[in-house]
Image (cartoon, grey):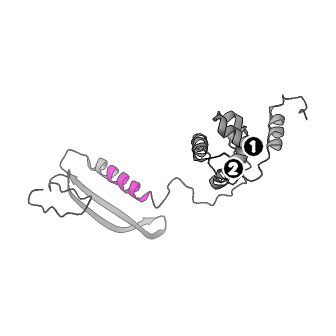
């Protein structure tokens, strides 16, 4: 690698010309017969090595490298037949924290009183408010906003979230039905 210029492209590593254990490679494409058909091709490879690697191992390793490189274009694990997708019915994942009360946040007295005076009982109601809306609340300032934001971020929540169908009564009724012991009617 001596005498090489330093202006090589990024990712190019200059190596000695004798670095490879492969001495010579020859290939030939010829016609092949399979049954009565003669329109197939056959690839004959000849690989000579310096003895440190067997030709079969060199071919296997180079084939693996080629497969890994082409794998980004073709997924070899996929079947070629189109699969019929069945609809998957799954329950929506709900962040349980939305249905906790704001009293559980362990806020400062001032912040807790502001939320209580604003009529915000659940965290789900709180996160649907924007920061600007919260700052308009009486006695609610930047310090309270930052205190609540930190707690919400730890829960994976934040202000200004859009929550469709936020209904604590329905949520708790459904939860109670699921928790009812098997064989006993759910308590209404």
**Quadrant into which the C terminus falls:** top right
Q: In this view, does 38 lie above or below 13?
A: below
Farthest residue, direction front: 139
How many residues crowd mark 2 within 10 Å: few (<14), some (14–19), many (20+)?
few
On screen, residue 135 versus residue 24, left or right, reads: right
Residue 31 drawn at (x, y percent): 38, 69
Q: In which quarter of the image is residue 63?
A: bottom left
Along the viewing direction, whichever of 162 and 79 lies nearer the viewer? 162
Residue 36 drawn at (x, y percent): 49, 68
SS for dot 2: loop
Identify the residue shown where x is 35% and y is 53%: 65
SS for dot 1: helix
Identify the residue shown where x is 46% and y is 61%: 73
Residue 67 drawn at (x, y percent): 40, 55
In magenta stretch: residue 71: yes
Q: Measure the C-alpha gap from mark 1 to mark 2.
A: 9 Å
Q: Residue 137 carries which label?
A: 2
Residue 147 drawn at (x, y percent): 58, 41
In magenta stretch: residue 141: no
Q: What residue span does the magenta drawing correspond to?
A: 61-80
Identify the residue shown where x is 89% and y is 28%: 184
Q: Name the residue under label 1.
A: 117
Farthest residue, direction bottom: 39
Q: Which of marks 1 and 2 is nearer the N terminus?
A: 1
Q: In which quarter of the image is residue 48?
A: bottom left
Q: Is residue 20 above or below residue 4?
A: above
Q: Is residue 110 above or below residue 49?
A: above
**Quadrant into which the N terminus falls:** bottom left
On screen, residue 149 versus residue 58, left or right, reads: right
Residue 122 in sight from this viewpoint: no
On screen, residue 150 versus residue 1, left or right, reads: right
Farthest residue, direction left: 3
């Amino acid at each position: 690698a001596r005498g090489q210029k330093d202006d090589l492209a990024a990712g190019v590593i200059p190596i000695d010309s004798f670095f490879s254990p492969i001495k010579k490679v020859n290939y030939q494409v010829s016609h092949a017969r399979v049954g009565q058909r003669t329109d197939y091709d056959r690839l004959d490879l000849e690989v000579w090595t310096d003895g440190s690697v067997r030709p079969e191992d060199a071919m296997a390793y180079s084939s693996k490298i080629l497969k890994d490189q082409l794998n980004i274009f073709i997924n070899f694990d996929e079947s070629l037949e189109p699969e019929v997708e069945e609809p998957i019915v799954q329950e929506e994942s709900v962040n349980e924290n939305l249905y906790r009360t704001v009293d559980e946040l362990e806020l400062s007295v001032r912040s807790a009183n502001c939320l209580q005076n604003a009529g915000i009982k659940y965290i789900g109601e709180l996160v649907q408010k924007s920061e600007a809306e919260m700052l308009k609340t009486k006695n609610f300032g930047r310090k309270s906003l930052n205190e609540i934001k930190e707690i919400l971020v730890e829960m994976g929540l934040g202000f200004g979230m859009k929550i469709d169908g936020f209904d604590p009564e329905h949520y708790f009724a459904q939860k109670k039905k699921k928790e009812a012991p098997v064989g006993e009617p759910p308590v209404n």
